[in-house]
Amino acid sequence: MLQIVLKSYDYYEGKIDGKIGSVSKAALRSFQNKNGLIVDGILGPQTCLRFLDRANISRNTTNINNDDTNKIMQYSEEVETQQIILKELGIYTGTVDGLNGPGTKRAIKDFQNRAGLVADGVVGTKTDKALILGEAAYVQNINGNIENASESQTPVTAASTSSSAIDLINYNPNANCVEGYVNTIDVWVPDPCFYPVFVYRFGKTAQVNSQNELDSYLQARWSLTKEKVYTSIGPVSTQNYTPGVNSPVNGLPMSPDANNSIVIGIKNDNNVRARPQSGPQNADAVVEVLVEGGMTRFINIFYQSDTTYHGPIRSARPTDPTVLRPLGGVLVASGATGGLIPEIIDMGVPVITDRRPEYFRISTRNAPHNLYADTEKLKSLAVTKGYVKSTTPQPLFAWGDPIVSNWAANTYLNLTFSSQTKTKWTWNGSNYVRTYYDAYKGSSSGNVHNWVDVNGNQGQISTTTVIALFCEPYIHPLQLPSVKTVGNGRAIILHQGKILDVFWKRGSNLDPFHIVDKNGNELFVPKGKVWISLVPSTKAPSFG
């Protein structure tokens, strides 16, 4: 905790590890010196009181150019993404906070040196492209210096083919080798010494015939690994479920006057500075997904319910549309990494992003954690734009009335999304309540996760049913941690103090989620407000 506080005032730049060593003590003494305290390196009562007096604290401005202070210390989602990449590379050891401080700039310079770029600490076009490549951008790992790479060397013709046969017409290892390049008619000239390979992206296949051409395709987010192909399974069966009467989102009967014109899924931040959130307590279902830095975000799904106060809203991620597509839903977010929104739209999921009057900013929180919205206005906008695909969306799960009493008794479920984020659901006799561990908050676990409404009232996040789907993790071509929701995997369902440990399967993004037993027999899922956790399959749960 001491390190976190000192870092927030720019006195500590080391790793947050809870160990109060010489670096932490030196930072504490520096804080005491600049704030008129006895300089003893001891966290005594006067120092603690000073920590709490935020309005009058003297921050550490050493090594920060005073002319650029405001620019450097302003939060930026781009800087936050850069910090996450640099931390994964083992270069950046500070807090992922989106602030372009001295530690971040030093890490950028270190990366630029390794990538053979001008080490100026500024993330320009070339550095940004190199960051996307990660370690592959290091000069010892690539042919040539990325600084000298031609910006025009991008795939010009994406030859789409389903053939598995490599065309060797240009391959001749005994010929004179040439470096592949794009000629005057925008066609790649092959290198006869390069054995051709296939690259893949979104169902397309292209053959490349030189190392330079391959590098360009990989930079454009193509892959050397062919995607798995699944066959659509189709809709689920239901039990005691009437379309238009029961909710496709959670199976519950809907009020006759419900505002169920369209399904919307709103991104909800789960950063330490975003809690307590507003929205999970009102949503018909919540989906929790992994994002950068080992953190998670929520997709709060609204169909028959509404709220005038939902937030904070954050940017879209690759997993989001895969959950909303079977419901014909609309994704509501605050922008996204460049190139992602067109990809989401191509999947058949419309996107609404920051606009007025549907969105608004609150004054009690700092950006970017102050963007909120009204779901009634969002639904009205979506309908006006013609986004309605069906007046009766298909059920997301096989809603029914299974005999839960036959399930095993259970009181809790621990889920691990990453080393930074873990959640626990505990049965309290009527609902499942949520606690969490967040490495960015501190070393303690069992933190009660609260919601807050527009009037400041708070309560612990709870749900009737928990569904944990264990999904294959992967890194999206935009370098965004994601999970695959098409395929199959383990599924754990909690309801009424009971647990069912089974499997899920899905053949396409158009399919709902099918829950099956070990023999492949489809199972019904209890109706009720549901929290769906998309957990990396590499992380084992614990329960009892």
Image: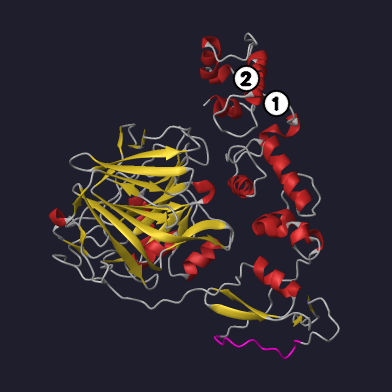
The prevailing secondary structure element of the residues shown in magenta is loop
Residue type at mark 1: give it.
Answer: Thr
Q: Nearer the viewer, residue 147 or 539?
A: 539
Which disc number belongs to residue 61? 1
Q: Is residue 300 left or right of residue 204?
A: left
Instruction: Return the x and y of residue 63 as percentages of the image width and height.
Output: 75, 29
Q: Is residue 165 magenta?
A: yes
Q: Is residue 272 above or below residue 513?
A: above
Q: Quadrant of residue 544?
A: top left
What residue span does the magenta drawing correspond to? 162-171
Which disc number belongs to residue 28? 2
Q: Is residue 508 above or below residue 38?
A: below
Q: Earlier in the sequence, mark 2 or mark 1?
A: 2
Element under disc 2: helix
Element under disc 1: loop
Q: Is residue 36 left or right of residue 528?
A: right
Task: Using the numbered discs, state the Cα–Cα distance from disc 2 to disc 1 in whole angstroms.
Answer: 15 Å
Q: Residue at x 49, y 58 (%)?
A: 482
- Residue pushed farthest right? 176
Instruction: Return the x and y of residue 212 as percentages of the image width and height.
Output: 75, 72
